[in-house]
Image (tube, rainbow, N blue to C red):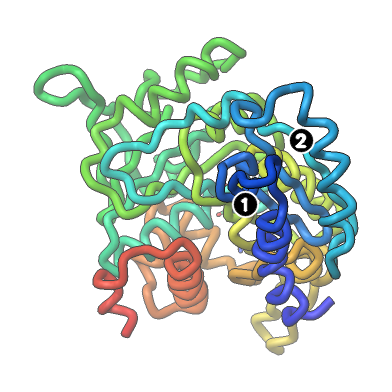
């Protein structure tokens, strides 16, 4: 499938909504989209989820409604599979965080594919463009933002003692579990800690006003992801993958999980896409070929960026100075700036901060 097809598929959710707007549950009543009975429509490629609001459609009416809607949506071109189901109850209770315009998760199906590197550089690129940016390192099993940003020490509380003050690096306000634990101490997060601790990382931090809060989630699918998606209204997820087929399958699972929670995938970043030979300049595909691009097209989301294997990127991570800050004219820095620009457009960040891109 080409990128054109991917772009067309972007409108699939709108096409589905348009069809659902023709459905009413009572002769003179509002349509099921206008009445809020349809909570969200999320399409991952040809697979469409219609999440209905159980507060508006009583339990006994949900199945007949699903049976009625399924063939209607299935009949649309490009639709391969339809699931109509109630949204999880917890999803409706998500609070909007005061003073934070957009919350975006950065996720990967597998560990070690460069998710935190992308999150940190993306945050710095957005900050360099004038946006007010926060980075919440919610990778509770292996917080790496402190290392990648060269931050150490512990977070302090605000003067009134009620909230936690984020640390600041390169214009990005940063909060990580790493700032709350005594140095070198690991913490095993189990159910109740995830349920209680993670929400606090969102709400008890004195973020100040933010245009965007990036949340670096752990890889895979776990309670932490569910807790995050239930805790805040996520504008969407940026999915980082290496090109190999196995990573891609993991990514797909992650996207399906987020779709069930009414969180759309904003696009894919393909990392470690190729290795450039320093002597002859030849480009070799190390970890499989075009998995990220193929995946993006298949699930109908844009390929936001492709990063080859770049030793400079690994070195900058080890040095604690993101490449976007340390070498702003380098190839990886330019790729991250392009990624930041695409993301800002996708989530509709305010325009006036973008002078430095024009
Ligand atoms: N394109 C790249 N070129 C070279 N090195 C890279 C690239 N992307 C990431 N790395 C390096 O790979 C290692 C893993 O990256 P990172 O910690 O960002 O991965 P992750 O997916 O967040 O891992 P985890 O699952 O542990 O959270 C780091 O040492 C990083 O510097």
Assess disc 2: are there few (<14), some (14-19) or many (≥20) residues with their C-alpha within 10 Å of its C-alpha.
some
Q: Residue at x 53, y 57 (%)?
A: 118
Position of 142 with respect to 246 (left or right) is left
Whether residue 145 is visible to the viewer of this picture, yes or no, is yes
Whether residue 270 is visible to the viewer of this picture, yes or no, is no
Q: Which residue position is annotated with label 2?
A: 85
Disc 2 or 1, which lies upstream in sequence?
A: 2
- The location of residue 237, given as percent across then percent down, is 58, 51
Q: Which residue position is annotated with label 1?
A: 264
Q: Quadrant of residue 79?
A: bottom right
Q: Residue at x 71, y 48 (%)?
A: 255
Label 2, label 1: how far apart the Cα atoms are: 16 Å
Q: Nearer the viewer, residue 151 or 8?
A: 8
Task: Single out the residue that lies furthest toward the bottom.
Answer: 280
- The location of residue 57, given as percent across then percent down, is 67, 30
Q: Residue at x 26, y 43 (%)?
A: 99
């Amino acid at each position: 499938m080409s990128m054109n097809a991917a772009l067309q598929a972007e409108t699939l959710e709108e096409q589905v909504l348009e069809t659902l707007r023709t459905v009413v549950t009572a002769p003179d009543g509002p349509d099921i989209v206008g009445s809020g009975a349809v909570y969200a429509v999320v399409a991952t490629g040809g697979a469409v989820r219609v999440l209905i609001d159980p507060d508006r459609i009583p339990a006994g009416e949900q199945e007949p409604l699903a049976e009625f809607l399924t063939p209607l949506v299935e009949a649309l071109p490009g639709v391969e599979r339809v699931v109509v189901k109630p949204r999880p109850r917890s999803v409706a209770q998500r609070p909007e965080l005061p003073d934070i315009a957009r919350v975006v998760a950065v996720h990967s199906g597998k560990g070690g594919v460069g998710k935190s590197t992308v999150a940190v550089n993306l945050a710095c690129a957005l900050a360099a463009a004038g946006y007010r940016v926060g980075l919440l390192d919610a990778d509770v099993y292996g917080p790496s933002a402190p290392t990648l940003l060269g931050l150490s020490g512990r977070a302090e509380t605000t003067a009134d003692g009620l909230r936690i003050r984020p640390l600041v690096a390169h214009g990005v306000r940063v909060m990580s579990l790493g700032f709350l634990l005594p140095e070198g101490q690991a913490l095993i997060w189990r159910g109740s800690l995830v349920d209680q601790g993670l929400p606090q990382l969102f709400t008890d931090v004195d973020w100040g006003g933010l245009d965007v809060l990036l949340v670096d989630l752990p890889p895979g699918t776990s309670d932490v992801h569910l807790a995050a998606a239930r805790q805040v209204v996520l504008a969407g997820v940026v999915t980082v993958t290496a090109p190999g087929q196995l990573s891609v399958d993991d990514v797909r699972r992650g996207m399906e999980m987020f779709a069930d929670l009414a969180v759309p995938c904003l696009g894919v970043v393909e990392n470690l896409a190729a290795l450039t030979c320093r002597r002859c300049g030849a480009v070799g595909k190390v970890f499989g070929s075009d998995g990220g691009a193929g995946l993006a097209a298949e699930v109908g989301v844009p390929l936001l960026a492709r990063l080859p294997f770049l030793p400079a990127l690994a070195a900058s991570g080890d040095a604690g100075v993101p490449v976007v800050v340390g070498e702003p004219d380098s190839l990886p820095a330019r790729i991250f700036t392009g990624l930041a620009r695409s993301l800002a457009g996708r989530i509709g960040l305010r325009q006036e901060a973008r002078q430095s891109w024009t």
